Amino acid sequence: MSRHDADATAGWSPESWRDRHAAQQPAWPDDKALETTLDELRRLPPLVFAGEARDLTGALSEVAAGRGFLLQAGDCAESFEAFSADAIRDKLKVILQMAVVLTYSTGVPTVKVGRMAGQFTKPRSSSTERRGAVELPSFRGDTVNDFAFEAEARRPDPRRILRAYHQSAATLNLVRALTKGGYADLRRVHAWNLEFVGHSTTGRRYETLAAEIDRALRFMAACGVDLDRDANLRQVDLYTSHEALLLSYEEALTRTDSLTGDAYDCSGHLLWIGERTRGIDDAHVEFLRGVENPIGVKLGPTSEPDDVLALCERLNPARRAGRLVLYSRMGAERVAASLPPLLDAVRRSGHPVVWACDPMHGNTFTHASGYKTRHLDDIMAEIRDFFTACFAADVWPGGVHVELTGEDVTECLGGTEEVLGDHLVQRYETMCDPRLNARQSLDLAFQVAELLRA
């Protein structure tokens, strides 16, 4: 058997999660319709391939060793209605810009992972939503039901699962074409600057950096380096990720790799378990312990060292570097106190994890205008305290995980070109949580690069 640790998956099958407590699952009204949909999904091709997931594990092993940095970024929740080639391209532009800033400024390779091609399902704090006298099922993402506050729209519909699959396939097709077909060529570094970003202070700073890269490339060419033959200059690897929340979808897209005999969840390259679903004996941990993809776990401020160590043992008993990413999502006011005990416990245990910071989810609040928002200052404060805690614990701060868009939205406050409270109403377009716009995302990349240089 080629599996890295057969004992680790004893008693596991893609269906074994069904015997465990499964939080955050929809109340499907028609079980027969759900099974018909899942049977169709099982017959469809995989969205990603086992070899790609293994490549990502290898790249993340370098991050775990302090020789790389993880940039994981994209939409809070993908949308059926907002789906377009332009939106995907512009989001990719921002990720490429951020990666260039991080890599060029620090000399550390950046592993690029998008929250895309599968991020359609969202956990909810309540199973229902009340508006006045009307109470309906909560919106759980486009895979499950519709955002409109109407009884029929909020009724879970399993056929939406197939639409999510096909939109993910189309997204992946375009992303692969852009990243491998010349669009991501480093000689196009200026072309990634979105027009509304280019006229900003941050956009001009990026153009200065891009000009330096141009000069470096011209120097290399003058020295006889054939830039056309170096694939690393002409294309990039962009992996996909999403929260593996809807377990029936993940199970249906699990395949056995013909080369190794191992099981891979072929819905995405990297899958994570959320703060609400990380119970050690619950269904999400049970399912993901058996697939060979890189796995992430979100850790909130109530996380205890013993719980985190138990998750490390359950999800990565063989202690393979690059297998496990731990995301700190504490909130700016709590990370300095809550994170150090976890860093210390994992470091002393010898588990080779990637530590990354999710500075978004712990810093959400409702503005006086009624809009749910975040402030870039709070986001950066959490990242700075994350870096400080990591350095104090002799742990490499391995990455950031942010929610962003390539569109000129006004959903998060702050930034060099400051979004103010009365701007929120202008272009607040998210279906769920507020996202950084392209300018704010680039602001964040420059500030993170400064922390890495330190």
Image (spheres, rainbow, N blue to C red):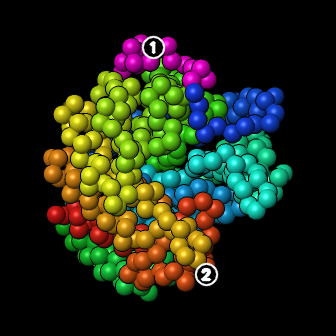
x, y percentage for residue 43?
70, 30
Which quadrant: the N terminus? Answer: top left
Above or below, 13 relative to 365: above
Q: Secondary structure at mark 2?
A: loop
Q: Secondary structure at mark 1?
A: loop
| Residue at 55% in and 82% down | 423
Q: Which residues are magenta?
A: 1-20
Between disc 2 and disc 1, the foreground one is 2
Residue 72: quadrant of the picture: bottom left
x, y percentage for residue 109?
28, 54
| Residue at 43% in and 82% down | 418
Q: Main secondary structure of the magenta part?
A: loop
Looking at the rendered structure, the kind of residue marked 2 is Gln
Q: Which residue is mark 2?
A: 426
Outermost residue toward the right in this view: 152
Which numbered disc covers residue 332? none
